[in-house]
Image: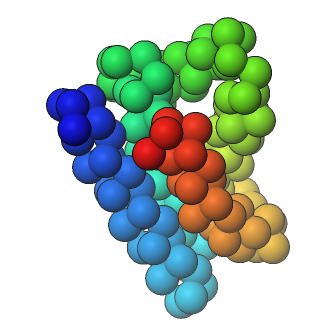
């Protein structure tokens, strides 16, 4: 296993842990914390995907999004996940966490889909 693969595996493990924490927070009705943990899981999975595909860790959520979109221009298989990343950033992180504006059903749905997002990112990374 290369250093990049080992680092990506560690980041994916962190993403799964944060996704599980988001589910736990949803179970007690803490929508804002659940949303932020789901966003963190999304970001970490994306960082690992970008690391594997580009050889570089993005460093920030903005760079993760930019690099993912750039990669998707050359590989159409990344288009859906790039769009999903942006949507999750806007809803989970921006609207819910920062502005305390959210639809409980939408947040529950997005938190519930976090594990799928992580699996998709792992699959696209070849993990």
For image coordinates 75% across by 21% down, the residue present is 76
Q: In which quarter of the image is the C terminus?
A: top left
* 36 versus 103 height, above or below: above
Q: In which quarter of the image is the N terminus?
A: top left
Q: Position of residue 6 (x, y in %)?
A: 23, 41
User: Toward which corner of the image does residue 31 lie, by quadrant?
Assistant: bottom right
Q: Where is residue 37 in the image (x, y as percent from the top left)?
A: 47, 61
For image coordinates 50% across by 36% down, the residue present is 125
Q: Position of residue 60 (x, y in %)?
A: 40, 27
Work out whether residue 60 or residue 71 is closer to the camera in this orientation and state it: 71
Left or right: residue 44 versus residue 122 is left
* 18 versus 73 height, above or below: below
* 28 versus 103 height, above or below: below
Work out whether residue 20 or residue 73 is closer to the camera in this orientation and state it: 73
- List the single residue furthest toward the bottom: 28
Can residue 36 be seen?
no
């Amino acid at each position: 296993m290369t250093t990049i693969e080992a680092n990506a595996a560690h980041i994916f493990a962190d993403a799964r842990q944060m996704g599980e924490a988001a589910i736990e927070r949803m179970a007690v009705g803490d929508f804002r914390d659940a949303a932020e943990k789901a966003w963190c899981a999304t970001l970490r999975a994306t960082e690992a995907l970008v690391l594997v595909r580009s050889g570089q860790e993005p460093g920030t959520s903005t760079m993760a999004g930019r690099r993912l979109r750039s990669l998707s221009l050359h590989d159409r298989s990344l288009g859906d996940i790039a769009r999903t990343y942006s949507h999750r950033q806007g809803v989970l992180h921006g609207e819910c966490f920062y502005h305390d504006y959210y639809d409980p059903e939408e947040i529950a749905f997005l938190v519930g889909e976090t594990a799928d997002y992580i699996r998709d990112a792992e699959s696209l990374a070849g993990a």
